[in-house]
Amino acid sequence: MDFVSPVLDTVKCLWDCCDKRAVYIRELPENLKSLRNEMAELENVYKDVKKRMADERKHQKEIKHVVTGWIDSVEAMKREVNDILTEGEDEIKKKCLGTCCPRNCRASYEIGKMVSKKIDAVSQLCRKADNFQEVAASLPTPPVSQVAAPLPTPLVIQVAAPLPTPPAIEAGAAPPPPPAPAVIELPLENTVGLDSLSDKVWRYLQDDKVTTIGLYGMGGVGKTTLLKRINNEFFKTNIEFDRVIWVVVSKSASVEKVQELVLRECGCLDNRWKGRSEDEKARDIYNILKTMKFILLLDDIWEPLNLLKIGFPLLNDQNKSKVIFTTRFLNVCEAMGAESIKVECLKFKEAFALFQTVVGEATLNSHPRIPKLAKIVVEECKGLPLALKIAGAAMRGKTTPQDWEKNIKLLQSYPSEVPGMENDLFRVLALSYDNLSKAKWPKTKSCFLYCSMFREDWEISCKQLIELWIGEGFLHEFHKIHDARTEAEDIIDELTLACLLESNQSKTHVKMHDVIRDMAMWLAGENGKKKNKCVVKEPGGWIEGHEIAEWKETQRLSLWDNSIEDSTEPPKFQNLGTLFASGESMRSLPTRFFARMPVIRVLDLSNSELTDLPAEISTLITLHYLNLSKTEIQNLPVELRNLTKLRCLILDDMEKLETIPSQLVSRLSSLRLFSLYASLGCNGDWGFLLKELENLKHVSEISIPVRSVLHAQMSVNSQHLRRSIRRLSLQDCTGMKTMEISSYLQILQMWRCFDLADVKINLEKGRGQKLSDLSEVEIVRCPKLKHLTFVAYARNLLSLTIEYCESMQEVIVEDEEIGISEVEQCSDAFSVLTTLRLSYLSNLRSICGGALSFPSLRELTVKHCPRLRKLPFDSNTNCLRKIEGEQHWWDGLEWEVQAIKHKLNQHFVPK
């Protein structure tokens, strides 16, 4: 029996070892709870220490290194604990089927062990804070004055009290650096709504990898105020810099002028550098700053600055110097390699608080109705701080509701007449407009002013805006619409970068801030001198005859959802070049309304309730652009054939349109753009117009629906049509088994093509990239279609919708028959796709063979695709914000990397 004892000892040892490990697994739920509680206690202590630090900074004390080190440790611990808690919760959920045992004992043990150790670490970190009797020490008295001199002109720099005159220096030698660091406090009013932006800047300042920070935004939005606040914050922080240099650059400043401002700021007297060359000044600045850790604050930059040319040492993580600047232009930030921070307009609550500080409590409380009227004023300013300050100053001291109502009416109708608006606001904002004269495109200013013709807060379709610009002749030098669009898109980018327009995320629409729009209308009216030169009537008004008579000198007229009084005498619009008339209230036009418009170029009647066009439209022989989209018109008058100068005819979404007279289109000899998209009258088949369009040599952009195999083939077989058709809708093309699509297409729809089995690309010699223009594809009820491999070549595809295609097993097929090598070459497939919708695809098993990044995908919808068990996402799929599908489908998905599912799970919305 002597062998039994060693065995028992071994078993006991193994049992003790296993039991210790089992404890980590068994007590994991309870330990997670304990860790969470310990972390909550540490968080409370952390907040107390942070508050003490903030209080000490207000008294200009320096935070102790041991305290800042503890803060860093807590923040690192928070990140680690959050990760462990997430992993622990996930591990608890993974149980073997029907039991309480973990699916992976090893993983549960490792996590349990980490949790146990972290509990001790968090508790120890919490106890360390007990030693912080003091969190800061007093700083020595600053050697220079912290009182700022006033800014007499935009180009004068804020400087410290004069430094001792340096000794004489030899020619060519750099002046010696000043004996002490200087931070000059700048005059600053109370700031509102800048806390989060200020915090973001300070995070960048503490990041050694960030050397340059650009604050950009529209004029008057508070960029300079934010920069001054940052400058003054250096009195309250323990970040050490040898010198903080503040320079107001302004629009017209040259390199030499900036050099002189910097030298003055560095304490160099004028007689030391006057008459020296630009290179000599640069050398002086370099020698002064090369051993310093400095902060350079540049206010109001209009063009990229070459800091090396000015004389600043190269910024890097060794010298740890930083540059922060303000500008109105995002492209300036990009050109200077800066981390860009956009300064936005204030939210309503913040805007009202700012307005309240300017107008004063006494005025706001002088009558019970005034606070409500004040909210209307604030709404009109749309969060622009400069506008809020000027409006507040104008209303200060006005204590009767009548005064407020009078000024509100003025602000809404003629804002330039509100005191201070023209000189202090519009002229400041107009500097950005003036700067457009340097733009690459000479018509940029005209294109900008044109945007003010749309109603307040209107999201302007970029496609429609560009077509209007073409109709106006702003882009007349281009013979092809595609080339004109390319330049117009660049102009829109230019205006967006200058913060004169705001773009949505998909860049399909732009918007003009209301105050910028008021400024643009003021400019369009020759600085307010000609109020009726451009007239925009907001929705809901009844326009009487006497009001129309006042518009006889008007050049652009925009009527939004208005009704017009009929009159026996037709109005005279001798100078009218542009007319918008849209909205549900626009059901009819006055008698002979078009009779006296001898120079009109653009007529937009879209989105109105008009049911017919008057015959006198044939007299508008100067017309270049006609848009009847989304109207109730059933028949186009044959008289339209007289409009031989017409370049753009747009008839989209005209659901009631039944007839287009034969030979009408073919008579429009100047036509360049013809669009009949989604107009389903005439049984939805307008293919008979293809023959007429084929004979129009200037047409370069066509959008059309067809419903026959013959017309579908004609759209490809004719070279002129193939190159011109940009939006094609194929519907009910029975008998069409294969379809070749043009490589020039931008949008493709295929509905109810029940026999269609394959879609191929028509390859044309000289056409480089296949389907490079295709941005949207929609395939619905094509039950025999097996795949859509052609979309792999659409590198600019934004939206893909596939519904009721029962034979489809893969969206992109990768096999020898299709050519796997070709598919593999399409590495950028779906690289800009933002929307993917897959519905009622009963046999779909795969989207594509391997994982792709889908770096731009924001919305995914999957409905009734029971066999789709995997999604082709990888770790770079970061933009998804919404995933719609059935809960059981989502729960049953297979993931090779669980971390991807955890990341995407928060965006899933069950349907």
Image (cartoon, rainbow, N blue to C red):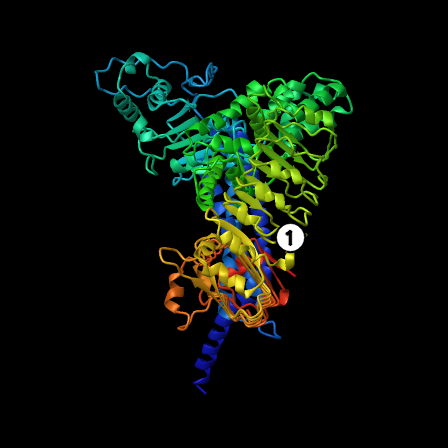
Q: Nearer the viewer, residue 155 or 58?
A: 155
17 vs 370, left or right, is left
Percent across and percent down for residue 752 are 60, 66
Determine whether 490 is above or below 3 in the image: above
Q: Position of residue 799 (x, y in %)?
A: 53, 55
User: Taking 907 as reference, is 326 left or right?
Assistant: left
Image point (28%, 20%), residue name: 176
> As displayed, is residue 477 above or below residue 105?
above
Percent across and percent down for residue 811 are 50, 66
Q: Which residue is mark 1?
A: 659
User: Which of the two residues, 171 or 242, is positioned nearer the viewer here?
Assistant: 171
Whether residue 563 is visible, yes or no, is: yes
* Residue 162 position by quadrant: top left
How many numbered tags mark residues here?
A: 1
Residue 67 is situated, as x and y percent measured from the top left of the image, at 47, 38
Q: Look at the numbered disc 1 and give the secondary structure of its residue.
A: loop
Question: Please, is residue 253 above or below residue 823 in the view?
Answer: above
Kindly identify the amino acid type of the residue bearing the numbered disc 1.
Answer: Thr
Q: Nearer the viewer, residue 253 or 86?
A: 253
Nearer to us in this view, 477 or 693: 693
**Can you name the residue that lies furthest to the bottom here?**
1
